[in-house]
Image (tube, grey):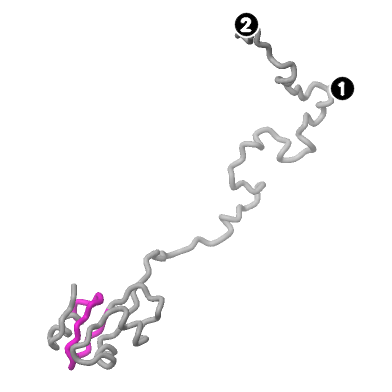
């Protein structure tokens, strides 16, 4: 049975600490396992900053900064009110599916917005987002706008 007082450390479980810089006969003299001369042989070389490139101008500082801003949100496809007046008849409903079917917006379009200030002669039922002024024109022509 194994008890705590009978436990012994395995003889090969620990290694002798490497002693460097103690003369040529030690096997680790002269360069003390640091290789030849140069930047990496000097003290402190292992504590260089992550992006350090050996003293030259770092690539990050060589390249120009990206100016401006690009929104991650996709802008809606716009459809003119005058185009709706030409493509839709009186009393028809304007939806995203209907706009795609009539090829007024591309098939992969996620959102649509109706804009424009054209006078309408037909009453339309608009179920897509619409600008405030365009919405007033649709209502004035006898149509409806879903908010």
Left or right, 126 with reference to 15? left
The CA distance from mark 2 to mark 1 is: 41 Å
Q: On the image, numbered disc 1 is attached to which residue?
A: 25
In the rendered view of the protein, which quadrant contains the N terminus? top right
**Where is residue 109, by image quadrant?**
bottom left
Query: Which span is picked out in magenta?
Result: 114-133
Q: Residues within 10 Å of mark 2 (few under 14, many from 20)?
A: few
Circle nearer the viewer, 2 or 1? 2
| Element assignment for label 2 | helix
- Please determine whether, in this image, residue 2 is positioned above or below residue 64: above
Seen at 61% across and 36% down, the residue is 47
Task: Judge by depth and name the residue closer to the eye, 28 or 144.
Answer: 144
**Residue at the top extreme, as displayed:** 5
Which residue lies most toward the front here?
Answer: 1
Image height check: is 35 above or below 95? Answer: above
Q: Which is nearer the eye, 2 or 114?
A: 2
Residue of label 2: 5
**Front position in the image: 10 or 50:** 10
Q: Earlier in the sequence, mark 2 or mark 1?
A: 2
From the image, give the main secondary structure of the stretch colored magenta: loop
Q: Mark 1 falls on what kind of element?
A: helix
């Amino acid at each position: 049975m194994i008890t705590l007082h009978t436990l012994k450390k395995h003889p090969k479980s620990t290694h002798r600490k490497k002693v460097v810089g103690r003369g040529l006969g030690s096997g680790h003299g002269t360069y003390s396992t640091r290789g030849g001369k140069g930047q990496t042989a000097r003290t402190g070389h292992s504590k260089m900053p992550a992006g350090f490139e050996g003293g030259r101008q770092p690539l990050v500082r060589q390249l120009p900064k990206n100016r401006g801003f690009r929104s991650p949100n996709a802008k809606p496809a716009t459809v003119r009110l005058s185009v709706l007046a030409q493509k839709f008849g009186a009393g028809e409903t304007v939806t995203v599916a209907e706009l795609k079917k009539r090829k007024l917006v591309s098939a992969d379009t996620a959102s649509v917005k109706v804009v424009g200030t054209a006078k309408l002669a037909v009453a339309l039922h608009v179920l897509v987002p619409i600008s405030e002024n365009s919405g007033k024109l649709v209502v004035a022509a006898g149509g409806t706008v879903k908010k």
